[in-house]
Amino acid sequence: MTGQPVSLTAFWKSFRAKVVGRKFVQDVGILTVTNFVGAALSFAQAILVARWLGPELYGVAALVMSYPTLVYTFFDARSSEASVKYLSEFRARNELDRVRATCKLGYAVDFAIASIAFLVVAVSAHWAARSIVNRPEMTSLIIVCAAAFIPQALIGTSRSVLTVLGRFRLTALVEALMTILRVVLVLGLVMSGWQVTGVVWGNAIAMIATGLVYGVLAWVLTLRAWGGSPFQGNWQTLKGRWREILGFLAYSDLNALLGLISKQSDVLLLGYFRNPTEVGYYKLAKNLASGLSHLTGPLRSVTYPKLVHLWSAGRLSDFRRVLYKLAVTLAIPLTFGVILSVLAAPAAIQYFLGESYLEASVPTQFLLVATGLRLIGFWVSPFYLATGQVRLLTVFALAGAIGAIPIYAVCILFWGASGLAVSRLALTLLTDTTAAVLIMLWGIRTNYGRLSPKPMGSPIGN
């Protein structure tokens, strides 16, 4: 029997209705496009500023901004993950007093962290300018950069509010506009002859503006959706949940800090044991492989609140169904994209960068596989966070941190940059793949240990 031919128009209508028309795909798509546009603008800014300033001044600007950022990163509590989880949970239960109290807590934690980081930088700025930057006259610029973190503290919880309310397009618009503002400010000030000062002030003004814009938007949306401003929440309404919330914050912070060890120590170890040329190959490979991560972030941002909502509402069957669809449905196109990027990497490197960079091909391919595995398993981290298993997630991060330095060192000594890339892939298999396997076992057994959603009243709909 001969089937009826399907017209291109009919196929497109079906594809648009089943795939493109879905809100999940639209939200991920708009965030992904924004990420790639932002990355392209930042790349162009970096090239122009580097050419205008020259290697020495460009390095000075990087050091001036890196020191406050490092201090802030060390103290940062990563409260946005906790905010998304508990805002989604209390919203699902229609506990609006707790929603506002969670907003207030998130802002309080973020402002406290930013203030502590600023004080530490202010006290040590002269030492950093003299010992790290080797330019004592840069002390004031280091303090300026640190001061910008205080208004920027509005971003974390404000973005969480927009995420929980599903305002991903608004988030994408703000990110795009603020990236354009930063690029225009930095390039304009550097072109005007402000040099390092222009780079620092351009970034600082953009950070302040971004924080204020997010803060205003969250204020307006909170008033409309939850009947009060974020600062009207009463912390007494969180009674009985304080230990859980603070524990989640603590483990999220520890999880991120442990992750920094495996992510930041590789280049330093390669430089220590080998030579700058291999560092150059590996750094290029790392930058190229990071392109896949621009899709991982949007997928996690949209998936996380959805899973939290279903889990908090006690809808276990829907939770499992959504998790299965995310893991299986998107696995095929994501895997195809990863394989294509791995195969195309050597030719792309030779075409765009020349034969002198061909030795970066093998490290790039291994790092693409490692980054691709995290992309395909984008749903793993949201699962553990949504179900409150942040301690187990921290165990995987701890395993990666403990194994990172000795594994990196041995592989570097024997195989250099390529060995380091292989070791990064091995750690990804050890941590991320193990975490994914445990989720699959949970799905098969219906219950992972004592893990189950808390009972509640009637859930709200999608």
Image (cartoon, grey):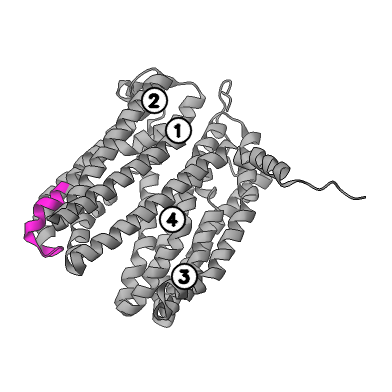
Q: CA distance from mark 2 to mark 4?
A: 35 Å
Q: Residue furthest top?
A: 227
Mark 1 closeness class: few <14, some 14–19, many ≥20 residues within 10 Å:
some
In the depicted structure, whether residue 356 falls above or below residue 117: below
User: Residue under circle 3?
Assistant: 364
Q: What's the CA distance linking mark 4 and mark 1?
A: 30 Å
Query: Closer to the observer: label 4 or label 1?
Result: 1
Residue 68 x/y as whole percent: 21, 52
Return the residue at label 1: 167
Labelled disc at residue 397: 4
Height in image: 364 above or below 235?
below
Circles 4 and 1: CB distance less than 8 Å? no
The one of 56 and 87 positioned closer to us in this rendering: 56
CB under 8 Å between callouts 3 and 4? no
Q: In x, y percent, where is residue 103?
A: 35, 29
Residue 35 in magenta stretch: no
Label whose residue precedes the other's in the sequence (3 or 4): 3
Q: Earlier in the sequence, mark 3 or mark 1?
A: 1
- Of the numbered discs 2 and 1, the one sitting upstream in the chain is 1
| Apparent side of residue 178 relative to residue 459 in the rendered image (left or right) | left
The disc labelled 4 sits on which kind of residue?
Answer: Ala
Find out whether the residues at labels 2 and 1 contact each other: C-beta distance under 8 Å: yes
Q: Secondary structure at mark 1?
A: loop
Task: Count the labels in the image.
Answer: 4
Q: Quadrant of the C terminus?
A: top right
Which residues are the magenta region? 131-144
Q: Secondary structure at mark 3?
A: helix
Given the image, on which type of amino acid does mark 1 rest? Arg
Q: Quadrant of residue 18?
A: top right
Labelled pair 2, 4 in contact (Cβ < 8 Å): no
Q: CA distance from mark 3 to mark 4?
A: 23 Å
